[in-house]
């Protein structure tokens, strides 16, 4: 049923059954049929649709990741880290509303910065042929995995791991590169660059010390 939706395009970008229903259908396609979804995902076109999808799913996932610790803190208030940090009055004074407002801003900032970094890594491995928008679209639609935060404790870990899988598959399909090159650009190359940067800083500190 879900795969049949792709024959008519991405439901979220061409809504015909209502925004909420097509949002849910698109979430299902991304999470459970990523290879087919990203293979058929347009590489160029509207920026607003993938951005809105990423903001909605990413913000809900982020809010859920805050919700469980806050709820647990309320149930075990005397041992709550929120009380120790003086955050009890923050939440009671409408801080939760502020967090809900801040969530889409944080997701938008993270999407923009991460898309730029990932696309730069792809260019370094000669794998960014699909263009920047293709990279942005993959990362935006991969935010669907953050909804796993609805499950307390293990949901965040499972969602984070599945998001990496979605991003690797998506980048591979959107840029017509192998899975290994996608993994290299997304995980290995940034780690190597960070290690080189740390080594360079330590070397400079060592030279300065002597």
Image (cartoon, helix red, strand yellow):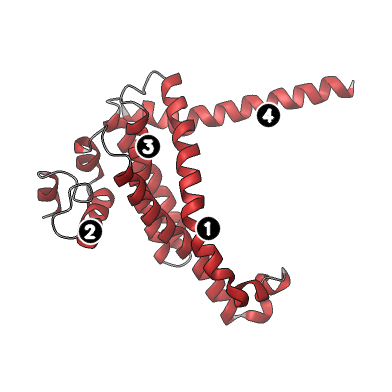
| Residue 186 horizontal side relative to residue 69, left or right | left
* Disc 3 element: helix
Distance between mark 1 and mark 4 Cα atoms: 32 Å
Q: Earlier in the sequence, mark 1 or mark 4?
A: 1
Q: Badge 1 is on which residue?
A: 102
Looking at the image, which residue is at 49% across and 57% down? 103
Badge nearest the viewer, 1 or 4: 1
Residue 19, numbered label: 2
Q: Quadrant of the N terminus?
A: bottom left
* Residue 153 visible in the picture: yes
Q: Mark 1 or mark 3, which has the lower sequence index?
A: 1
Query: Which of the two marks, 4 or 3, is nearer to us in this view?
Result: 3
First in sequence, mark 4 or 3: give its number.
Answer: 3
Left or right of 181 on screen, residue 120: right
Q: Which residue is mark 3?
A: 136
For disc 4, the marked residue is 198
Q: How busy is the neighbourhood of tag 1: few (under 14 within 10 Å), some, or many (20 plus)?
A: few
Q: Is residue 80 visible?
A: no
The percent coordinates of residue 177 (x first, y second) are 30, 25
Farthest residue, direction right: 210
Q: Nearer the viewer, mark 2 or mark 4?
A: 2
Label 1: state its secondary structure: helix
Residue at 55% x, 65% y is 98
User: In the structure shown, which secondary structural element does the residue marked by tag 4 occupy?
Assistant: helix
Q: CA distance from mark 1 to mark 3?
A: 21 Å
The answer for how far apart the CA atoms under marks 1 and 2 are is 23 Å
Query: Which of pointers 1 and 2 lies earlier in the amino acid sequence?
Result: 2
Mark 1 and mark 3 in contact? Answer it, CB < 8 Å: no
Alpha carbon separation for disc pair 4 and 3: 28 Å
């Amino acid at each position: 049923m879900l795969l049949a939706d792709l024959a008519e395009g991405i439901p979220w970008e061409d809504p015909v059954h209502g925004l909420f229903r097509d949002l849910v259908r698109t979430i299902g396609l991304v999470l459970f049929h990523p290879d087919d979804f990203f293979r058929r995902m347009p590489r160029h076109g509207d920026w607003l649709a993938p951005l809105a999808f990423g903001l909605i799913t990413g913000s809900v996932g982020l809010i859920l990741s805050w919700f469980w610790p806050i709820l647990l803190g309320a149930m075990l208030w005397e041992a709550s880290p929120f009380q120790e940090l003086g955050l009890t009055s923050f939440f009671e004074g409408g801080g939760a509303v502020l967090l809900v407002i801040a969530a889409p801003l944080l997701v938008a900032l993270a999407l923009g910065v991460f898309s730029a970094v990932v696309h730069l890594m792809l260019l370094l491995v000669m794998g960014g042929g699909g263009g920047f928008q293709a990279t942005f679209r993959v990362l935006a639609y991969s935010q669907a995995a953050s909804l796993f935060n609805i499950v307390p404790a293990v949901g965040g870990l499972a969602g984070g791991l599945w998001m990496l899988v979605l991003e690797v598959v998506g980048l591979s399909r959107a840029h017509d590169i192998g899975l290994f090159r996608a993994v290299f650009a997304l995980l290995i190359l940034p780690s190597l660059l960070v290690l080189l940067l740390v080594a360079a800083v330590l070397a400079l500190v060592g030279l300065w010390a002597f």
